[in-house]
Structures are given as structure tokens and as C-alpha cells.
Image (cartoon, helix red, strand yellow):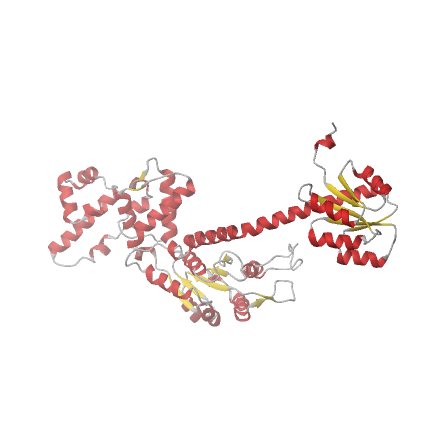
């Protein structure tokens, strides 16, 4: 038995009123096709009705001139009832009208002329069989796509919700009575409206997090959030970064580049450190904000964009406006809504929540599981003023996780600068501190004693035995004083 006979051959129906023509076609095609033959249109229709659900006829090869009906008329009926079948006409006449009618009404794929060449005929029918296969594959893929559309839609929605939970309002850490609560309330109120927002605050306070929250709480949440640090690049490079350029616009511009404004079209563009830009660049930025269009470098055509701009700075822009360093018209254009992010030293109530959230992200980033902070470590974290704000706290916790040898992070893992200072980022000057004492001598002595105890405990990482020896107290006496001043609770 041949290999050909073992495989399922594609079925073809030959409709021709000449028996010798049928036999010639069968001999030519039987190696590659399962050939069924009919002498007229009626017999051909009977075979299709009987065999189509069983054999699955893929191609009909029909003679044009037959008794009672034409090949085009027969194939028109085939098309109406079995549109997937590939239809081919075989004729000894070159009648242009028949060809046009066949193509338009019967959807004929090919029009072959007699006498036919066996090699050419076989190649044409093999291609027809491939067309049938591709049609079936296309239908299957279309069905899969229609079926998958709800699944894909739910998948996209799930992803969007996950991103929103990571960067929206719910991602901002805030405890009861925190000054950041007023900022979050303002974010929730202004996010739905396409107004420019100016976010101010010290370096490291989380101004970009506020900008992301505004974006992901707005109607633009499904579009791009694009960032640029204006203070990190010179004006010439900043212009090409934001507006893009055409090839040949300057030396090194070997190809067109789409600027960040175009990349953010429909979404939000966050311009960090906007106060570091020059007055010359500020003029160009103002035009984009006013007109909603710009020209890429080297282009004479304007590009229209729909972008919400959020800017941020750690400078006093109002003072820069008064001194002429920052354009007044641009300032008011950017600061339609102004939000000030408080420094971390004013958010002491947020420190435990924030430290634990950063610990979780640091643990995941380093792939090193930890359980939490000891009481001593949290006390030291709460006592320090964090001049670098959230960014400094994040780096400190990363350091602790990297150095940890136990599941709980102790105070011994903190940097010396954090352990050294009970309050403030530098050691407190003695005279400056004592000038803040109040009350009579006894009250002032109590305040001084509490300060000395607290400083020693933090510096010695809450080791009571060492602190007692240094201060000349018994361990019991030290504990009594800690309880008296409420420091035992802090520990």
C-alpha cells in the first residue's frame, strides 16, 4: 500500500458531460485528490448533497458548456448552498461575458481553458486546496477571536485595576490625622478634570507618586503616563526629547523620532523639576500648552496632541517668578491646581505604615524574605527626621534588608546617622537644646534627664545593660526612669 493511499486526500467534484474528459481528469488528479465525477448539473448536485457532510468536498471543477444548464449557473447554486467550496470553470471557449458573469455571480476562483496541461491543472488545483484550507483556518481563528474577546476584555480590565491599585490613591500611605490626607482629598477632587497641576515639595517626598495617582484616578487612566526630568538634561536635548525630530534635523539625527508629547497623546505627561528649565525653553513649552500643538525639530508641519500636563518642582516658583527666573504666564498656566506634598518629618504618624510598606517592596525587590522590624528599629526610625524624605527612608530599608541575617530587622542594621541622632539630622547643639526648656528648675531638670536617657538608649540601640553602665544606674533603676518618662513604651 502506498503512502498516498494512507493519507486522507482532499475531495474534488468534476462535473463534465464528456466521459473521456472525466477519465482524463481522474487519471491526472487521482494521485493527489479523491475524485468524484458527475455528467451534468443535477448529478453533481446529488453528489454534493450526499457526500458533502461525509467526504467534505473542497473543490468543484465544472465544464462551462453542458446540456440543460451552464457551469456558471451550476456554480452559482453551489456558492449559495456551500460558499466554502472553491469553484473553478473549465471551458474550451473564451467568452468574456461568461467569464465576467462567473466571477461576479458565481464567485469563481479560476477560469481554465481547454485543452489543459496536466502539470498546470494539477498545480492550480493544489493551490485551490490550499485556499480552502486557509479559508477554514481563517474562520476558526475568527471564531476563536470572537470567543476570546470577552476573556481578553476581562484580562485588560483586570490589568488596569491592578495598575490603578499600585499607582492610584489606594497606593498612597496615610495614617489618621496625616497632613497627606488633605493632598489625597484634593487629588480625588481634581483628577477627573483636564486641568494642569503643579506639585510642589522637597526632594524625595513622592511628587511623582501624586502625579501618577492623579493620572490613574482620571479618565485618561487607560492611556500612557509619560515622565521627563527636566533638570537632568540640557535645554537643547530636552526640546528634542519632548517634541521629537525629523531625520537630518541636526548632526546625529539619523532617523525620525517621536517626542514624549506625542507618546503621551490622550494621556498624561509629567514634567519633573520644571523649575530648572531656562526662560527660552519656557516660551516653547508655553506655546504647546496654549495651542495644543508643536513642530518636531526639522519639520514644517504642526502636530496636534491631547495631553494633560502635570509639573513638579522643589523650588519656590513664586519667588522665581518675582525675580524673573520663571515666566509668570507659564507658571499660572501650569499651576491651575497647586498641590504641596508635606515632608516626611511632618508625617511622623505615617512612618510605621510607610516603613512596613517599603519593607515589603524592598523584600520583593531583593528576593529576600523578612518578617518585620523590631520595636527598637521602629523607635529609631520614628525619631529620625529624614531630610531625604521617602527616598531616603526607602534606601535605608533596602540597606537593612540587604544586611539582615535574621527575619526581624533590628536597630543595629540602621545607618550610624539614624542611630546617632534622636531628633534632627545632626546632633543637637547643647545650648540650642537647653534654650527650649521651660518651667522651673525641677521641670527643666526632668526634661534634661529625659533627653539624656532617650539619646543614650537610641545611640546604644536600646541595650539597657550598656545604657545602665554608661549612665551609672542599675538596670532596675534605668527601667524605672524609662517608665517614668514614657520611654519604655517607645521601646
Q: In the image, 292: left or right of 139? A: left
To which quarter of the image does residue 457 belong?
top left
Residue 425 visible in the snapshot: no
User: Which is nearer the eye, 459 or 350?
Assistant: 350
Q: Residue at x 28, y 57 (%)?
A: 176
Residue 413 percent across, percent down from the top left: 32, 40
Q: In the image, 384: left or right of 273? A: left
Residue 315 percent across, percent down from the top left: 41, 62
Q: Residue at x 82, y 38 (%)?
A: 28
Residue 27 percent across, percent down from the top left: 82, 37
Residue 442 visible in the snapshot: yes
Q: In the image, 285: left or right of 162? A: right
Q: Which quarter of the rendering shows the N terminus? A: top right
To which quarter of the image does residue 53 belong?
top right
Residue 97 percent across, percent down from the top left: 84, 59
Q: Which quarter of the rendering shows the C terminus? A: top left
Q: Residue at x 15, y 55 (%)?
A: 444
User: Which is nearer the eye, 119 or 283?
Assistant: 119
Position above or below: 162 against 335: above
To which quarter of the image does residue 292 belong?
bottom right
Amino acid at each position: 500500500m502506498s503512502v498516498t493511499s494512507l493519507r486522507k486526500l482532499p475531495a474534488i467534484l468534476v462535473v463534465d458531460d464528456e466521459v473521456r474528459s472525466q477519465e482524463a481528469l481522474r487519471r491526472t488528479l487521482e494521485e493527489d485528490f479523491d475524485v468524484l465525477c458527475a455528467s451534468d448539473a443535477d448529478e453533481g448536485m446529488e453528489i454534493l448533497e450526499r457526500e458533502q457532510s461525509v467526504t467534505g468536498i473542497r473543490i468543484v471543477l465544472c465544464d462551462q458548456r453542458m446540456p440543460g444548464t451552464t457551469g456558471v449557473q451550476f456554480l452559482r447554486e453551489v456558492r449559495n448552498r456551500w460558499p466554502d467550496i472553491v469553484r473553478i470553470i473549465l471551458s474550451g471557449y473564451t467568452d468574456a461575458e461568461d467569464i465576467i458573469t462567473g466571477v461576479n455571480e458565481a464567485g469563481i476562483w479560476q477560469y481554465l481553458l481547454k485543452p489543459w496541461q496536466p502539470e498546470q491543472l494539477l498545480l492550480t488545483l493544489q493551490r485551490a486546496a490550499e485556499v480552502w484550507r486557509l479559508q477554514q483556518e481563517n474562520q476558526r481563528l475568527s471564531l476563536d477571536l470572537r470567543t476570546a474577546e470577552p476573556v481578553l476584555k476581562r484580562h485588560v480590565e483586570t490589568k488596569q485595576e491592578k495598575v490603578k491599585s499600585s499607582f492610584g490613591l489606594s497606593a498612597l500611605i496615610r495614617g489618621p490625622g496625616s497632613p497627606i490626607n488633605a493632598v489625597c482629598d484634593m487629588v480625588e477632587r481634581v483628577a477627573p478634570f483636564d486641568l494642569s497641576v503643579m506639585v510642589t515639595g522637597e526632594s524625595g517626598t513622592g511628587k511623582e507618586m501624586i502625579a501618577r495617582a492623579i493620572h490613574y484616578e482620571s479618565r485618561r487612566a487607560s492611556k500612557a503616563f509619560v515622565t521627563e526630568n527636566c533638570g537632568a538634561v540640557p535645554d537643547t536635548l530636552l526640546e528634542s526629547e519632548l517634541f521629537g525630530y525629523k531625520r537630518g534635523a541636526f548632526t546625529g539625527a539619523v532617523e525620525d523620532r517621536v517626542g514624549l508629547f506625542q507618546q503621551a497623546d490622550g494621556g498624561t505627561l509629567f514634567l519633573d523639576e520644571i523649575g530648572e528649565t531656562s526662560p527660552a525653553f519656557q516660551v516653547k513649552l508655553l506655546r504647546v500648552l496654549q495651542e495644543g500643538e508643536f513642530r518636531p525639530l526639522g519639520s514644517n508641519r504642526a502636530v496636534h496632541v491631547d495631553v494633560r500636563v502635570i509639573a513638579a518642582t522643589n523650588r519656590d516658583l513664586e519667588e522665581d517668578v518675582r525675580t524673573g527666573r520663571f515666566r509668570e504666564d507659564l507658571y499660572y498656566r501650569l499651576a491651575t491646581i497647586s498641590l504641596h506634598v508635606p515632608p516626611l518629618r511632618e508625617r511622623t504618624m505615617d512612618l510605621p505604615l510607610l516603613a512596613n510598606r517599603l519593607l515589603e517592596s524592598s523584600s520583593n525587590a531583593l528576593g529576600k524574605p523578612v518578617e518585620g522590624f523590631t520595636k527598637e528599629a521602629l523607635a529609631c526610625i520614628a525619631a529620625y527626621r529624614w531630610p531625604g524624605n521617602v527616598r531616603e527612608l526607602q534606601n535605608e530599608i533596602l540597606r537593612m534588608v540587604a544586611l539582615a541575617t535574621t527575619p526581624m530587622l533590628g536597630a543595629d542594621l540602621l545607618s550610624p546617622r539614624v542611630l546617632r541622632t534622636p531628633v534632627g539630622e545632626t546632633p543637637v547643639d547643647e545650648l540650642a537644646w537647653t534654650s527650649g526648656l521651660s518651667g522651673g528648675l525641677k521641670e527643666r531638670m526632668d526634661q534634661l534627664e529625659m533627653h539624656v536617657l532617650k539619646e543614650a538608649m537610641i545611640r546604644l540601640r536600646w541595650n539597657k545593660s550598656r545604657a545602665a553602665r554608661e549612665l551609672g544606674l542599675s538596670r532596675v533603676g534605668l527601667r524605672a526612669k524609662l517608665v517614668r518618662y514614657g520611654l519604655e513604651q517607645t521601646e
